[in-house]
Each structure stands twice: as C-alpha cells, then as structure tokens.
Image: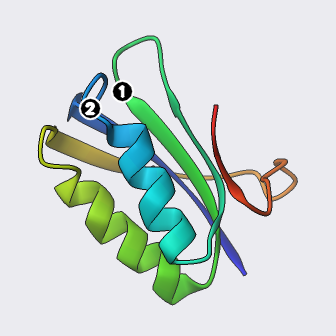
C-alpha cells in the first residue's frame, strides 16, 4: 500500500471535481479524501496500490468535462496521516 497527496490547480471548484475524484477513486478501490482548499485548489489524499494511484493521478490531470486542470502537484505525505479506508469528500 502506498500513500499519495496531490494539489490540483485551475478551474477545479464548482465544476464537480470532488464528485469526479470520488467516483474515480471508488472505481479504483482507493481510500482517502478530497477537499476544496481556500485558495481555490483541490487537495486529494489517497491510499492504495501503486498502479491504482498512478491511474488516479492520470485522471486527476484530465478532470471532469467542466474543469480546467492547470497543474497537478504531488506532495509528500506523512505516513502516520489518518486516511480513511473508503473514499470521502471533506
């Protein structure tokens, strides 16, 4: 099991991005969460297999139809961070 954290910037709030991420993560059987950040970006933290996380990252870069993804930054995650087993919107 691996753990990853991404910050997605662009037009990613108010366009169904969190719902899109939740749907994709559940399809890939990943745990974690997605949430809007005050600066207009979206944070995704997820735990699962390397292959599933790589697939999720590719889908984050595409986003839902109404979104415009300008940047996907991969950040370090503290291993002790509390990550849900199922996927949730926060």
Classify mark 1: helix, strand or loop: loop
Inspect this view and state whether residue 48 appears. yes
Mark 1 and mark 2 in contact (Cβ < 8 Å)? yes
Looking at the image, residue 39 sits to the left or right of residue 90; the answer is left
Residue found at x 61% / y 76%: 29
- Indicate the position of residue 64 as horizontal and vertical percent values: 21, 49
Please name the residue that numbered disc 2 is placed on: 12
Q: Which of these two is toward me, 35 or 73?
A: 35
Q: Point out the image quarter for the C terminus.
A: top right
Where residue 49 sits, quadrant-wise, is bottom right
Residue found at x 29% / y 48%: 72
Give the mark toward the camera: 2 or 1: 2
Count the numbered circles shown.
2
Classify mark 2: helix, strand or loop: loop
Q: Is residue 12 above or below residue 87?
A: above
Please name the residue that numbered disc 1 is placed on: 41
Looking at the image, residue 2 sits to the left or right of residue 11; the answer is right
Scheme of image coloration: rainbow
């Amino acid at each position: 099991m691996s753990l990853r954290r991404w910050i997605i910037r662009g037009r990613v709030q108010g366009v169904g991005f969190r719902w899109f991420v939740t749907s994709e993560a559940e399809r890939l059987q990943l745990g974690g969460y997605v949430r809007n950040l005050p600066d207009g970006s979206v944070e995704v933290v997820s735990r699962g297999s390397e292959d599933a996380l790589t697939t999720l990252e590719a889908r984050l870069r595409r986003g839902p139809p109404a979104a415009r993804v300008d940047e996907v930054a991969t950040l370090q995650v503290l291993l002790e961070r509390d990550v849900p087993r199922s996927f949730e919107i926060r």
